[in-house]
Amino acid sequence: METIILIVVIAVVLLGAAAGLVVNGRRHKQLPPPPPPDTTLGAPTRPAPVESRPSAEPEAEPQVEAEPEAVEEPAAVPALDIPEPTAGRLVRLRSRLSRSQGSMGQGLLSLLSRDRLDEDTWEEIEEVLLTADVGVAPTQELVERLRTRVRVLGTRTPDDLRALLREELLTLVDPEMDRTLRTARHTEEDSPRPAVILVVGVNGVGKTTTSGKLARVLVADGRTVLLGAADTFRAAAADQLQTWGERVGARTVRGPEGGDPASVAFEAVKQGIADGADTVLVDTAGRLHTKTGLMDELGKVKRVIEKHGPVDEVLLVLDATTGQNGLVQAKVFAEVVDITGIVLTKLDGTAKGGIVVAVQRQLGVPVKLIGLGEGPDDLAPFEPGAFVDALIG
Ligand code: GDP
């Protein structure tokens, strides 16, 4: 009996244990199902691929595909600046001539309006013109003409005087000079090629800045431009020029630092021909006009470029604030290269607007562009009428 009871107890215990195993086994089976494959997380973010693939694989694709597109696109198409139109720039920038306006234009008007125009007053008038850098000979001419005309005029109303002064200053600035910039592509059938502009001047006058601004002027006028960074002495100059170019979509050809400027200039024109550019603008190294070797090298740059055809414009950049020193530079440069136009920079920072007259007289070459500030569109085609109007206010 006892044995039977013992067997029953053992049987119950064994059954209980067996029942527990089943429960445990069931518990395993009842655990929450494993998380769905990650693919189901990614899938809703993009349409099902056309080629169906195993569900585990596409999970990474949406992220890989989506991101680079968003990042790369803007870099591939940089936004270009749209330079201001060149027409009317001088009128827009006329207030930048306020220093010259105050001391030269207004100074002359108030002296001429005095009740008595005695010798002292005429001397003061002369002084104003000389201080504004008009130069000795043009000053004497102007004073003579003003003396005669004021005498003939008799009574002097402010309007009469203003009109008279405007006319005489305009004559002095010489509206007859041809200030056209030759920047149009040569279309002769046998040798179509870009117009070539060479920009020269001493260090610090604003040559590279002017080249950059001029590229914008040309782009604004609808030209395709290629830049040549022939200032190989200063790596920063080539970088500076390239940055200017990139802003308006103009390519820059540059050479190794310290390389031969003439060969960079040659390559730039060659590339401009290959690209079918309208205008190639070559910025040369700033140089001391007193160093014969450097000046000779500039002559070489021009000669080497001319293997492709004549240079259309040689623009001499002069800093208007340097006065007589600028005139000395102009003379030396003119001996080495045939200058076809002057760019007077920094007229916004000086009262010496009369330098326009002096430099044209000295070289017999017109001022074609003036710099009136450091902004990218602060370079204006020189218009005698607008300039004189700005001077007398
Ligand atoms: P470079 O050595 O002749 O190439 O001279 P840069 O082009 O490097 O210019 C020298 C400095 O003159 C820079 O700080 C320019 O911003 C400044 N500059 C150039 N043109 C003008 C201008 O018309 N007005 C003023 N205020 N500054 C100018």
Image: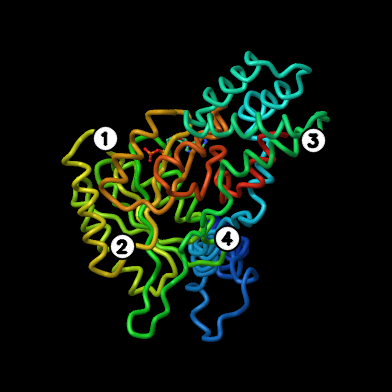
For the residue carrying disc 3, how many other residues have a C-alpha within 10 Å: few (<14), some (14-19), or many (20+)? Answer: few
Residue carrying label 1: 288
Tell me the crowding category of disc 2: few under 14, some 14 to 19, or many 20 or more residues within 10 angstroms, Cα based: many
Q: CA distance from mark 4 to mark 1?
A: 33 Å
Q: Is residue 178 left or right of residue 277?
A: right
Classify residue 383 as left or right of residue 342. Answer: right
Tell me the residue at 76%/32% (across/down): 161
Q: Which residue is at the front of the view, 358 or 84?
A: 358
Can residue 10 be seen here? The reply is no
Please identify the residue farthest to the top as the structure is shown: 120
Foreground tag (4 vs 1): 1
Give the quadrant of ligand 1. top left
* Dot 3 or dot 2, earlier in sequence: 3
Q: Amino acid at mark 1?
A: Leu
Number of other residues with Cα within 10 Å of mark 4, as a class: few under 14, some 14 to 19, many 20 or more:
some
C-alpha separation, residue under disc 3 versus residue under disc 4:
39 Å
Percent across and percent down for residue 100 are 61, 29
* Nearer the camera: disc 2 or disc 1: 1
- What coloring was used for the rendering? rainbow
- Asked if disc 3 and disc 2 are in contact, CB closer than 8 Å, the reply is no
Q: Nearer the N terminus, badge 2 or badge 1?
A: 2
Q: Residue flagged by tag 3: what amino acid is it?
A: Asp
